Image: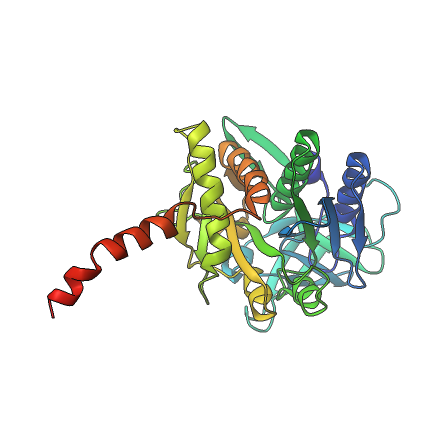
Amino acid sequence: MTEISAYPTASFYEARVASYILGELDRLGLPYQQDEYGNIIASYGDSSKKPLAIVSHMDHPGFEVLDPTHGRLLGHVRKECFERPVGVLVFPSLITHHSSGICGRIMNVEGSGDEGLLFDLELESAPAENSFGVWDLPPFELQGHLAYMRAIDDVVGCAAILLALEEMAERKSPCRCRGVFTRAEETGFIGAGNLAKQKTIPLDAIVVSLETSKALPGAEIGGGPVIRVGDFERTFDDRAESILRAAWQSLKKDNPEVKVQRQLMSGGRCEAGVFMLEGYLTTAMALPLGNYHNMGEDMTIQPEYIHLDDLATCVELLVRAAELTEHDPTPGFRERYQSKAEKFKGRLKGAR
């Protein structure tokens, strides 16, 4: 997580994060492919088994440079956050060499959230063509059990997938998993939507959309990862969610103190929706996130933060979910239900 946090990213400008992910997959010796849209699909395990596909996006809210003095927001950040100067770093879209970025400031903002915010920029030097910008915040800082980063949503989700795949490989887990890293989620699920339409992931896969999502009542930072029943627009598939619940129960047997939460997180949308529309059995999991999209409580640009224990439990939950994908996710329920139904069937008839 400390390594991936160093790489700037924004919608359509994910090349640095993607390059890091590909390097990690090479290190792990895992096969992968990139589709025509630049999404990355990594594979682990026995191709004869039913796959679990874990999906996370490589971008984060930022802006594209329109010319040396103007930029346009990519993703959702409230306009109030830019009503005072905001420090930024500007990078070329092409990876030419390591660079700390061109320093500058956003000095004025116009437009609306629906139309897209436009910025006036003051930069210390002229940017290259096709440049993008991020907020001038520390890439990573640790304060106790809280990790503060310039961009958590959702490069930490990408890190969690890599950690889960590494754990499966080390354990030689008898399962099949796809790690899916998508592009341009913050501008409308563009990468995931095209990937789902192309059926690049097998249609029999169970899809888990992995997010870092705004902490809400019942989905608290430090309370564990959240099995996400739904989002602002829809509820997800119970058949897919049952795999996560079974993984939770498995984890509790080994560690009764483990913290996992389950909520309908109504504060936003996630990529689960587009996979559902294309016919996939889909569920979701979220890490509770502070300063969502860098929006501090005082409407200034601040680092996002998560609890490290939530991340560690999330990784273990993903591994166990992959290992349980082909098993009955609700062992014993059918037998208990049928036994009681037979036992009391006569009472129902006699009470009419």
Q: Nearer the viewer, residue 8 or 29?
A: 29
Percent from the top left, x then y, of residue 252? 42, 33
Quadrant the N terminus occupies: top right
Percent from the top left, x then y, of residue 325? 57, 48
Is any part of residue 124 visible from this angle? no
63, above or below 98, in the image: below
Q: Nearer the viewer, residue 305 or 275?
A: 275
Percent from the top left, x then y, of residue 15? 79, 51
| Residue located 55% across and 35% down the image | 316
Instruction: Quadrant for residue 117, please give it.
Output: bottom right
Instruction: Quadrant for residue 169, please give it.
Output: top right
Quadrant the C terminus occupies: bottom left
The reply, left or right, for residue 102 in relation to residue 52 is right
The reply, left or right, for residue 244 in relation to residue 176 is left
The reply, left or right, for residue 317 in relation to residue 219 is right
| Residue located 54% across and 44% down the image | 302
Is any part of residue 169 visible from this angle? yes
